Amino acid sequence: MDIQQIPVISVSYNSAELIEDLLRCFRAHYRNPVTIIDGSSAAHYPAIEAVCARYPDVRFIHFDYNIHHGPGMAWAFQNLPLQGQVLMLDSDIQVIAPGFLESMAEQLQPGMYGVGYVNHVNEGGFDVDYAEGAIRYLHPACMLVNIEVLKQWPMPTKHGAPMTEPMLAIHRAGRHELIKGIDWLRNDFRAIETGATRSYLRHDWQGTVKRSGSYNLEEWSTASRTAAEVRLTVLAMLPPAARTIVELGANDGMLARGCVEADPRRRYRSAGSHPDKGRQVDIDALDDSYFRDHADADCWILDQALERSADPKQLLQRIRKFLRADACVIVVVPNAQHWSMQLRLAAGDLQYADVGLLSAVQRHWFSRTSLLSLLSQAGYQMAQGVPLTREPLQNPPLADTWRQLLRALGCDPEQAFQDAQPDTYIIRATLRA
């Protein structure tokens, strides 16, 4: 592949200065096509769009919310017409000399996932100072990937370490040969600590945070941001070949639009509400004829369905009765094991609300293990799973006490503690062989 034809993707947030610096120094050495995935606020994105317009072959794609690094990459991987090698660059990368892309392309062999800066993390995505038993983490700040291989693994997610899910999957599969660390890139990235001379790149970590003041994660606590994150994750999970999609539950028009925009050949159907009267349809009242009429579906999306159904197992079995062997279901389910829910139970604070696990329409609670058990009992197996963690427990004394209690109960304290962090599980399941 011609080095100058490798597409470049960068995710931006609220900093026209960083994008200006990135494009200026990159264009000084390379003419590759660049796509900027932007989630900036209304006060900032026009300036970033104007910067992009000043440089040739730069595409600007804006979302009206902070899409975040992981979901932004996932959207690009799933929706842009990418083939072969693809380069990811952080918006605060500066190219100080040519040759880095040539070096990376030379080391990325066919069949590999990617090359770049590789460090070690634990299963939560936090850096560790040991290698034995740790997860090798390909950092997205500067990574060159084979897009066809990348799509075979979980997509990046909203996380301080957005590549945790795919790296964890590669680690668990024992496929360590799929990623490779590059010595000069490690040297360049650590030069700010070691004082070493850089070869090609300058990267002052958390440049976006320093410019904008924060990651602005509080925006995602609102219902609209939560829905946006679920949409992006579901879109990333959809099989590329899926043409007919049926949704039960949430009736998310934005998800329908995103599916069709990503592939105009797709047909999207929803039973979430009556198309004329605008009211919610009782999914338990749908008879076999409905599921038979949708036997051509490549994927069923169950968002706000299993936990609200009178009989979630029966609902899954009715879908399975007419599900093609190569089709799948994607379920979106809140985590009843979340630490905040456990604390409310311990304190007796069971106040019903309009939304959440204590909403009036909530009929069933699921943990990770009970959700997987339900799928298995209904005749499915998990093909891919993504935990969405918006509010992890960040109180060390409470976390230590929690682990002591779990040990006293005879549980695996680390597994049970980790299962209490996500507030939503999104799982793609296929028919069990």
Image: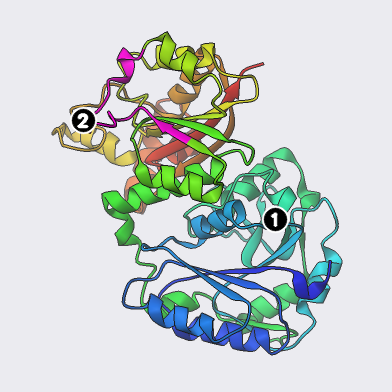
The foreground one among 129 and 153 is: 153
Q: Is residue 276 magenta?
A: yes
The foreground one among 138 and 123 is: 138
Q: Where residue 34 sits in the image (x, y, percent)?
A: 62, 73
The foreground one among 368 and 50 is: 50
Label 2 to label 1, Cα distance in Å?
A: 59 Å
User: Which residue is drawn at the image coordinates 49% and 84% (left, top)?
Assistant: 51
The residue where tag 2 is placed is 277
- Residue 95, can we see it? no
User: Which residue is drawn at the image coordinates 34% and 31% (left, top)?
Assistant: 304
Q: Residue furthest front?
A: 276
Q: Where residue 420 sits in the image (x, y, percent)?
A: 39, 38
Which segment did they paint magenta? 268-286
- Give the residue type at disc 2: Lys
Q: Residues within 10 Å of mark 1 (few under 14, many from 20)?
A: few
Q: Secondary structure at mark 1?
A: loop
In this picture, residue 25 sits left or right of residue 236:
right
Q: Residues within 10 Å of mark 2 (few under 14, many from 20)?
A: few
The residue where tag 1 is placed is 131
Q: Where residue 158 sits in the image (x, y, percent)?
A: 47, 54
Q: Quadrant of residue 325?
A: top right
